[in-house]
Image: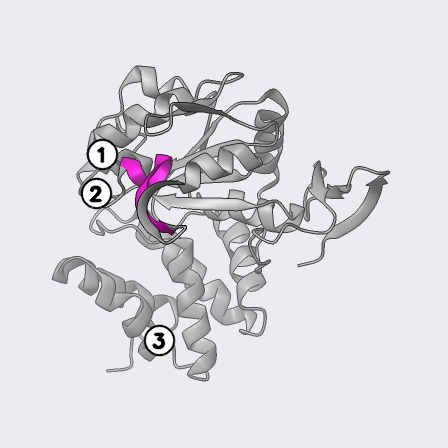
Amino acid sequence: MGTARKARELPETGRTVITIPNTKVEMEGLTPPHDLAPKERPYRFPADQVQDVAMALRLGMNVMLTGPTGCGKTSLPVALASVLGRPLVRFNCDGETRVSNLRGMMKPAAVDGVLSLIFSAGDLAIAMREGYWVVLDEIDAALPSVLFVLQPVLEENRRSLHLPETGETVQAAADFAIFGTGNTVGYRASARARHAGTQMLNTAFLDRFGMVIDCQYPDRLEEIERVKVNVPDCPEEFVDGVCRVASELRQDEHFRTDFSTRRCVQWARLIQAYEGDVLRAAELAVVRKLENATDAKVAREVIRRIFGYEGDR
């Protein structure tokens, strides 16, 4: 993945204007990259989605990224942060995420030889003070108590977080940005049925996200390019076949399971590792993950037909 990290220096600011790969979008990055910036990994940036994120950041809007599993919702802000060198903190909003993880808590500590309770700020409070990017993963699976605490944090132009233990109210630094991801956005009943633990997000909470980006699976030609970026040494005929299978299964009314781009990448890696053994790789990366016997039967039939194994028993 080539990056134009030295596109244009901004004197005496510690920043660089960086052209995002495969797009015409320029964004300010840090020089040198922050210690908490994600490490760069192979990624193909969707141009329109990068443009939307850049606009949201310029306007100070929170961004919600929604779509099926493995379509790149979380990867987009993480990849942008890595290229721009920006610090990023990620929260998985499951049932184990507590308010204390965000705000902080009192912890025992020795002060002048005396054991005392000292307040330790949570990761969200630190991120707000320091101007980090925050990704709230699977936000539609968060506990109501967590969503309640997030409401003032999501108030555009006046983001704040009250810490009852100290009486302090943390005001977000200028560079602070917040992204939420979810499979359902809280209101897609059919999608919620396939993602256990998600809940309805009320309108007041959703309205705190100024922009919602719909991250769906790419078309076949774009998906081929995304898989090739991640598995560049896999022969193209195999990558093409993998993406044909994914495209066909997503449209098959008898196949009820999501088929993610992530799964395509995993399958292609195993095809390469097993020196072209498509069926063995498919069993390991695809078939054994399927929800029921019908899906497995349909998947095997499509895989064998597309890769030319129909007559091979």
Foreground tag (1 vs 3): 1
> Residue 122: horizontal and vertical position, in percent?
39, 40
Point 29% across, 50% down: residue:
258
Residue 211 image label: none
Crowding at dot 3, Cα within 10 Å, few <14 / some 14-19 / many 20+, comes out as many
As displayed, is residue 166 above or below residue 245? above
Camera-side residue of 52 and 308:
52
Furthest-right residue in this view = 11
Q: Residue 130 is drawn in which quadrant?
A: top right
Q: Give the Cα distance between marks 1 and 3.
A: 38 Å
* Residue behind mark 2: 95
Point 35% across, 50% down: residue:
109
Give the residues drawn in magenta, as a range.
99-110
As displayed, is residue 28 above or below residue 84? above
Disc 3 element: helix
Q: Residue 201 is drawn in which quadrant?
A: top left
Q: Are marks 1 and 3 in contact (CB under 8 Å)?
A: no
Say which amino acid is labelled 2: Gly
* Residue behind mark 3: 281
> Residue 285: horizontal and vertical position, in percent?
32, 69
* Residue behind mark 1: 143
> Residue 88: horizontal and vertical position, in percent?
52, 45
Report if residue 108 lies within the magenta region. Answer: yes
